[in-house]
Amino acid sequence: MSLHLFNTLSRTKELFIPLKDKSVGLYTCGPTVYNYMHIGNLRSFLFEDILKRTLFFNSYKVKHVMNITDVGHLTSDADTGEDKMLTGAQREKKTVWEIADFYTKAFLVDAQKLNLIPPKILCKATDHIKEQIALIQRLEQKRFTYVAGGNVYFDTSKLADYGKLARLDLKAQTKARTEKDSHKRNPHDFVLWFTKSKFQEQEMKWPSPWGPAGYPGWHIECSAMSMKYLGEQFDIHCGGIDHIPVHHTNEIAQSEAATGKKPWVKYWLHNEFLVLSPGEKMAKSGNNFVILSTLEEKGFHPLDYRYFCLGTQYRMPLMFSYEAMAGARNARKKLVEKVLELKKAKKRKENLPLSKKYLQQFNDQINDDLNTPQALATMWELLKDEVLSGKEKYTLLLKFDEVLGLGLQKLKEEKIPAHVIKLAQERLHARNTKDWQKADELRQKIIGLGYSVGDTTEGYEVKKSANGPS
């Protein structure tokens, strides 16, 4: 089966045909590095990793570019609210440069824990100011800009099809945006370059052709960097559904205005939110801020979260609960145990037609707009098959895992030392007797020996820590 993907631009599932034979240009919106990524953010990166793995599975070469937003992103996508980087710096009493460096590294650690294949190019907005200024000048030459209040704006009225990605009804829009920024000529105009920010203490500033030192708006970085590394037209652009109405809409506008090439991007893919209850998404500004280390502290492995995300197709809202996470952990634990068992299986006569049937079934499902829930179902169906040999199952599981990314090939039987097990049992007893201080002391001893301990419905689970002894 050929690969079909849901294109937000057309609102239909389309046959994927790249611009250049078997080579794919892929751009994914990266993190704004002012805080840890919460697990809702991480769902986006997991979806994009599954997409990339699926492209590899279909024998495509993939040039993946991801940005790091370390300047220009305000709390509202529409050029209002506080500066996110400045907010992080004030919260932690650090410079914005220190904040950007710390949270970039934190994101990369999370990405590694989740077994994400790194992008070919990871580019920072602050390293590409020259390219952003050049793109704004290009728009200026084509008369798509105006300067007001010291800032450079994109004039959306000059673009007849502005808002096509989000299918905006421009006539029905209120004047709210122009009331918040009186310099805007039209409600949907957006800042390309700030020279007079309301944040006078802004640390990140660069000289520009538009007066005093300033800094770029958020949207321009993605256009400038994607075109630098992927060309003026490329295949796929991804992000969360929250990027559709403003950020990605504005990227399309400025890119197609500058180049005159349509479409700028052929396929737009967006993932739905992680939700805590119907209509309530996870947010850094709320009390529902859960990061990957929070899950680890509660006894979950990062790959338990990956498995949890695989259970829902990327375009569907994903309901989060610790009960659902426990279910994912148990399922992954059973999978790991089965894989380690199959790894020891002796070779016997193969059933090639049946093996091909399972591989084709998995291929069809993953190529149907990344249908990971069905792909997981096929994996479990395979494990229950009584005809295939253990070796055949093991071989197929490793093939499936090229897409699922659960690290099955690297699995090794892990023997926990007896003295660590003894400490874990003592800790369990302390918890059962509500001696919380002793339980915490024992947990710290276990961590010091290079292991982590988490609570489960059966008692406890001990694992070797990724970083070894502290």
Image (spheres, grey):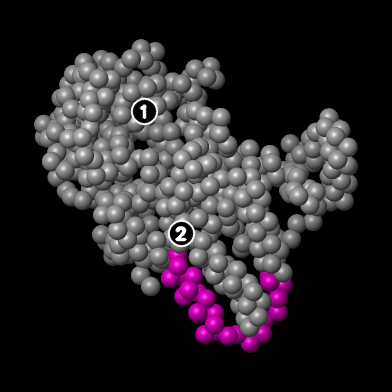
Kindly identify the residue that appears in the image at 50 percent across and 65 percent down.
374
Looking at the image, the residue that sits furthest to the bottom is 349
Instruction: Tell me which corner region of the image, top left, top right, bottom left or bottom right, holds residue 145.
Output: top left
Magenta stretch bounds: 342-366
How far across and how far down the image is residue 442, in percent? 83, 37
Please identify, in this view, whether the residue under mark 2 or under mark 1 is nearer the observer: 1
Q: CA distance from mark 2 to mark 1?
A: 32 Å
Instruction: Report if residue 192 lies within the magenta region.
Output: no
Prevailing secondary structure class for the magenta stretch in the rendered image: helix
How far across and how far down the image is residue 240, in percent? 40, 44
Which quarter of the rendering shows the N terminus? bottom left
Count of marks, rendered view: 2
How far across and how far down the image is residue 297, in percent? 68, 39
Q: Which residue is mark 1?
A: 76
Q: Residues within 10 Å of mark 1 (few under 14, many from 20)?
A: few
How far across and how far down the image is residue 120, in percent? 42, 49
Helix, strand or loop at mark 1: loop
Label 2 or label 1, whichever comes before in sequence order: 2
Kindly identify the residue that appears in the image at 83 percent across and 32 percent down.
436
Q: Closest to the observer: 87 or 322?
A: 322
Residue 98, placed above or below residue 250:
above
Residue 180, placed above or below residue 244:
above
Q: Which residue is mark 2?
A: 53
Instruction: Report if residue 364 lies within the magenta region.
Output: yes
